[in-house]
Amino acid sequence: DVKVTQSSRYLVKRTGEKVFLECVQDMDHENMFWYRQDPGLGLRLIYFSYDVKMKEKGDIPEGYSVSREKKERFSLILESASTNQTSMYLCASSFFSVTSGTYEQYFGPGTRLTVT
Amino acid sequence: SQKIEQNSEALNIQEGKTATLTCNYTNYSPAYLQWYRQDPGRGPVFLLLIRENEKEKRKERLKVTFDTTLKQSLFHITASQPADSATYLCALDRSNYKLTFGKGTLLTVNP
């Protein structure tokens, strides 16, 4: 089974702090993603990476950066946390499924971040 | 801009009935559409995929239809059970890697 793990389930940080969210997948997937999920807004893509050291902005990259030094690990960085970054953060990885002929995404359990 | 809408924020049905969830999209012609299930406090889990050239796909009690003329997908759960209660998300492909997700429909199956 594919496993995507995130470093913390719950995190509380203060405004202005630098925050690191870590994600690790164990299935050698090429693609990894960071989303945030908010009530009424759904899942929104922050950043994604299609290879080591490669990254692209998603729909809402402002205030975030990412790092992918190893294939299995994708980190999300909040340079200076703000209260409007309080959210559920979900990491995902994807691979090309020969069975379905498309990419399926596998999600981690999420990190609920509160910025006070 | 591309939009994906799931018509109901919440749906309540009685156990044993068929649940039908709707996903509509605009300004887009996806090659495929995916459905995910999300339980509270957990990440979404992939359920089913349907391609643009497929009218219908089934998996156990699940059935998905895809009407590219109406720009709509319907997701059915037959003989629903309380354990089917969850939020169901539809997602469209934006590229080989990226998906756009709907906001989800919270399904509650009452015993």
Image (spheres, coloured by chain):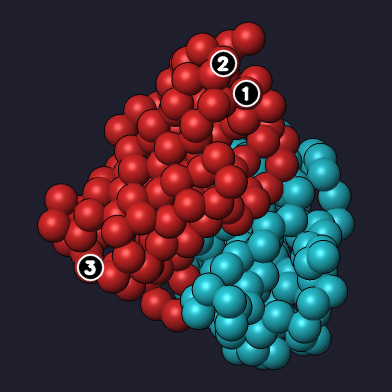
Chain colours: A cyan, B red
Among the 4 quarters of the image, the one containing residue A78: bottom right
Question: What residue did someone put label 3 on?
Answer: B29
User: Element under label 1?
Assistant: loop
Say the numbered circle drawn on residue B15.
Answer: 2
| Subunit ID for the residue under disc 1 | B
Disc 2: host chain: B
* Position in image of residue A25 (x %, y %): 80, 71
Residue at 32% across / 72% down in the picture? B31
Whether labels 3 and 2 share one chain: yes
Name the chain letter of the residue that bears numbered label 3. B
Amino acid type, callout 3: Ser
Label 2 element class: loop
Q: Is residue B30 visible?
A: no
B34 vs A90, nearest the viewer: B34
Of badges 3 and 2, nearer the viewer stands: 2
Residue A41: where, in percent of width, then height?
Answer: 43, 40
Residue drawn 34% across the image and 50% down it: B65
- Compared with A21, B110 (above or below) is above
- How far apart are labels 3 and 2 at the CA level? 35 Å
Q: Are marks 1 and 3 on the same chain?
A: yes
For residue A49, above or below residue B24 = below
Disc 1: which residue:
B81
**What amino acid does circle 1 point to?**
Gln
